Image (cartoon, grey):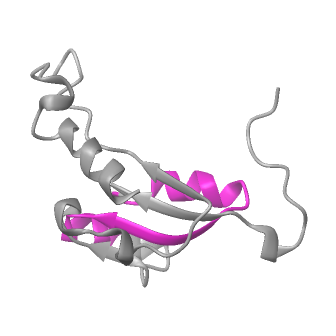
Amino acid sequence: MEVGWALSQSPESAPRVAEFFAGVGLVRMALEQEGCEIVFANDISPLKKQIYAANFDSSDYLCRDIKEVTGNDVPDVDLATASFPCTDLSFAGNRAGLKGQESGLLHEFLRII
């Protein structure tokens, strides 16, 4: 089974994607290789945005705490991704689970969606 979308050659059919916890754009890189169009990105770190901007168009990158992002900030999309912080889930982390301060941010993503 092949992973990915079966896209037509027409750019109008490209899935529109919102990328949360976008970081420096690694998920964007993979999605664009599959023919997706990133129309929104969000992360809290100005340094990550700077690195992102060095590699991609960052005009749709909202550098803001996800707790302050609303559904109105996000354009209509076909797919939303969330590479949320997993340190509270990791064996190497503090094992606080989704109640942890960082991994609990998944709930903010779900609120926006």
Q: Nearer the viewer, residue 85 or 99?
A: 99
**Residue numbers of the magenta segment:** 23-51
* x and y percentages locating residue 34 in the rendered image: 72, 54
**Residue that appears at 23% across and 61% down:** 66
Going by the image, does 17 lie left or right of 58?
right
Indicate yes or no whether the magenta region holds residue 40.
yes
Against 53, residue 23 (above or below) is above
Give the residue furthest to the right.
9
Going by the image, does 48 lie left or right of 10?
left
Against 100, residue 48 (above or below) is below
* x and y percentages locating residue 111 in the rendered image: 31, 53
Indicate yes or no whether the magenta region holds residue 87.
no
Going by the image, does 58 lie left or right of 28?
left
* x and y percentages locating residue 95 in the rendered image: 14, 19
* x and y percentages locating residue 72 in the rendered image: 37, 76
Task: Specify the quadrant that holds the N terminus.
Answer: top right
What is the total number of numbered labels drawn onto the structure image? Answer: 0
**Residue that appears at 29% across and 69% down:** 70
Residue 13, image quadrant: bottom right
**Residue that appears at 9% across and 39% down:** 101
Going by the image, does 95 lie left or right of 29?
left
**Residue that appears at 36% across and 76% down:** 73
Residue 59, image quadrant: bottom left
Task: Specify the quadrant that holds the C terminus.
Answer: bottom left
Give the residue furthest to the bottom.
59
Give the residue furthest to the top.
91
Q: Nearer the viewer, residue 62 or 29?
A: 62
